[in-house]
Image: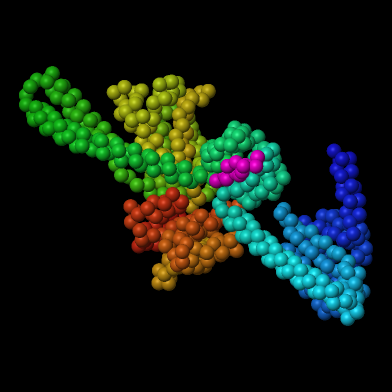
């Protein structure tokens, strides 16, 4: 293969050397890709400057120092200007007289993949002929002069046409540049594949959607860019797209369990356009919203029944209380006590149903997961028999996470007590936590009991399903499931080699740094901005400010030390705090974002904001802001 490449290179070089013009091609990094012998001869360049990889800047410096451009006072400034022009290269054509009186035309054009090609033509002889014709014009016949004038007019029209074409070409290049810039700013990977699956276009955002993948993938095959696992999930849909279909699908990426949505569109010429987006946060919010709707439906269905049932239980307890005061004998007293116990148990069951179906909003706060798990061990240990051990293993990093510590601890305590019941008088219960990339936090509770039955694996998360007979309500796992789903996570039941396992998967959301640092405040009201600046300063932050989304994005882009962004949703100009959130550069770690709004919770913009970040409803206090920043001990 190397011998073939060498042969092609030699043939290309020989072909270029046969061309009468001098030619040079530089890549997007301003390095020489190829040139011919006439380019070296025209400017008398040393061999080092015509070798592939030679620096454009060094070549310009050499040519300038040789006197090609006349007297130059500041050679460094001249070279810097030419390099800057090269980085924003535009198509051009002009003629100039060299220091040796040679007249050359210079035509340059950008290349689609970056870089440019320049052609230098010696037009000295042509110019001499034109001058000779002008000097002898008086000797020409009237007819020849007429033809000459006609030819000149035609040439002028042609020149005008060429100028118009050049302007159109520049407009197309500008439009293409704007389209590329727009594509690169989008929070998605946009690409085009040829008929064989090789990238012919990319907006260089692959690594922001598929972490760990390369950015420079032009000319690479999609299987090599994505890796075998992700490509295997996409390949069947690619085959469908190559046959004319327009598949849109989602899958979970193995690297850190991100949820990816992909749309494939045939281009009509054998290739395929690809749009890939990370929809992990959207999926988490969608799951939470679905769970909220289910709870609302359950509450609507059960509230009326629970009210009537509660009244009946009250009547029964009242009657039994009166009967207990009568002298009805020992046997009747036992029946009265049993009836009262059953009615009280029914009341507790109603209370748990109301807890599960009632509106209990999540209150995420900055939480130290390690401290929460250690306190959980202290709380749960006294409830375990002497022969049942409890281990807590925390493999998560010591970051503060946005979690509802109280509800999470209640859920884990519920699972530990279930595991205790499964172990009986002896066994081991283990609680372990670890991160899945920067997408999820997984907490598992395992035991050494008999494990879940097939029926329990299928129905264990359903309300009222229990394997404890009359000793269980069937609501414990359902309440755990409800809490996790409201967070946008998931619950998995399974069996290990030694017993049962329940795994909670919650969104991994970092809380802002508790020890201060630089905070970006985006608020368009001068008065409110002063108030929030003081709040952040009281919490130990240094503050920089903006009043528009674009201003905030510019600061976030230029200042990598920002550890917190506090932004109003409604801002000056057309864009909002949501646009600020979406526009953050996710090719590098994004600081935590807290949004503020005066909108009511029923407002669609409030709901949309909740899908993206924690939302503080105005007015709020420093303590409420601090609750989202500083870890609080579990309660």
Q: Main secondary structure of the magenta part?
A: strand
- The image quarter in which residue 1 lies: top right
Where is residue 129 shown, x and y percent of the image? Answer: 90, 72
Residue at horizontal 32 percent and vertical 45 percent from the top: 360
Please determine whether, in this image, residue 297 is positioned above or below residue 20: above
Left or right, 298 with reference to 84: left
Residue 26 included in the magenta stretch of the image: no
Please determine whether, in this image, residue 623 is positioned above or below residue 140: above
Residue in the foreground of this view, choosing between 572 and 175: 175
Residue in the foreground of this view, choosing between 314 and 205: 205
Residue projecting furthest to the bottom:
138
Where is residue 526 shown, x and y percent of the image? Answer: 43, 72
Please determine whether, in this image, residue 474 is positioned above or below residue 3: above
Residue projecting furthest to the top:
331
The answer, for residue 534, to whether it is visible in the render is no
Left or right, 85 with reference to 468: right
Residue at horizontal 19 percent and vertical 29 percent from the top: 343
Residue at horizontal 83 percent and vertical 61 percent from the top: 119
Residue in the foreground of this view, choosing between 317 and 19: 19
- The image quarter in which residue 267 lies: top right
Residue 275 included in the magenta stretch of the image: yes
Residue bounds of the magenta highlight = 265-277
Where is residue 345 shown, x and y percent of the image? Answer: 24, 30
């Amino acid at each position: 293969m190397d011998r073939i490449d060498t042969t092609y290179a030699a043939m290309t070089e020989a072909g270029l050397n046969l061309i009468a013009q001098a030619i040079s091609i530089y890549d997007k990094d301003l390095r020489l890709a190829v040139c011919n012998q006439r380019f070296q001869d025209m400017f008398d360049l040393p061999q080092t400057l015509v070798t592939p990889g030679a620096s454009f800047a060094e070549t310009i410096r050499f040519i300038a120092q040789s006197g090609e451009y006349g007297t130059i006072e500041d050679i460094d400034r001249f070279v810097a200007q030419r390099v800057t022009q090269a980085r924003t290269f535009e198509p051009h054509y002009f003629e100039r007289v060299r220091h040796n009186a040679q007249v050359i035309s210079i035509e340059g054009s950008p290349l689609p993949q970056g870089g440019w090609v320049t052609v230098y033509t010696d037009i000295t002889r042509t110019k001499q002929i034109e001058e000779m014709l002008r000097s002898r014009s008086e000797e020409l016949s009237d007819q020849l002069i007429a033809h000459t004038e006609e030819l000149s007019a035609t040439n002028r029209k042609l020149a005008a046409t060429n100028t118009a074409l050049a302007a159109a070409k520049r407009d197309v290049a500008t439009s293409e540049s704007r389209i590329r810039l727009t594509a690169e700013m989008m929070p998605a990977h946009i690409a085009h594949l040829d008929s064989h699956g090789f990238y012919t276009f990319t907006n260089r955002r692959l690594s922001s959607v598929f972490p760990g993948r390369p950015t420079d993938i032009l000319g690479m095959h999609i299987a090599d860019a994505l890796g075998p696992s992700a490509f295997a999930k996409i390949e069947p849909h690619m085959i469908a797209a190559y046959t004319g279909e327009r598949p849109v699908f989602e899958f979970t990426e193995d690297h850190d369990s991100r949820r990816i949505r992909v749309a494939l569109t045939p281009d009509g010429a054998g290739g395929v356009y690809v749009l890939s987006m990370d929809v992990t946060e959207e999926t988490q919010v969608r799951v939470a919203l679905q769970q909220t709707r289910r709870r609302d439906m359950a509450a609507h269905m059960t509230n009326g029944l629970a009210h009537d049932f509660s009244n009946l239980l009250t009547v029964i307890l009242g009657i039994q209380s009166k009967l207990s005061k009568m002298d009805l004998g020992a046997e009747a007293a036992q029946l009265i006590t049993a009836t009262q116990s059953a009615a009280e148990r029914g009341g507790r069951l109603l209370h748990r149903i109301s807890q599960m179906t009632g509106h209990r909003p999540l209150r995420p706060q900055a939480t130290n997961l390690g401290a929460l798990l250690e306190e959980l061990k202290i709380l749960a240990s006294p409830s375990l028999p002497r022969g049942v051990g409890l281990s807590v293993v925390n493999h998560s990093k010591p970051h503060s996470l946005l979690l509802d510590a109280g509800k999470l601890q209640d859920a884990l305590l519920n699972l530990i007590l279930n595991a205790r019941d499964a172990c009986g008088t002896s066994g081991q219960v283990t609680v372990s936590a670890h991160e899945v990339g920067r997408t999820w936090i997984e907490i598992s509770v395992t035991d050494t009991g008999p494990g879940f039955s097939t029926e329990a694996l299928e129905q264990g998360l359903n309300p009222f399903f229990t394997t404890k007979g009359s000793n269980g309500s069937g609501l414990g796992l359902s309440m755990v499931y409800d809490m996790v789903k409201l967070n946008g996570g998931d619950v998995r039941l399974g069996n290990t080699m030694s017993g049962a396992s329940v795994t909670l998967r919650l969104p991994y959301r970092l809380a802002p740094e508790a020890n201060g640092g630089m905070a970006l405040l985006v608020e368009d009201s001068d008065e409110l901005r002063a108030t929030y600046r003081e709040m952040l300063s009281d919490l130990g932050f240094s503050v920089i400010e903006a009043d528009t989304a674009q201003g905030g994005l510019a600061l976030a882009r230029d200042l990598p030390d920002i550890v917190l962004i506090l932004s109003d949703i409604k801002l000056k100009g057309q864009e909002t705090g949501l646009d600020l959130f979406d526009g953050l550069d996710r090719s590098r770690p994004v600081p935590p974002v807290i949004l503020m709004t005066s909108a009511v919770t029923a407002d669609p913009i409030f709901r949309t904001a909740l899908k993206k970040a924690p939302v503080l409803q105005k007015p709020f206090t420093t303590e409420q802001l601090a609750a989202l920043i500083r870890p609080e001990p579990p309660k």
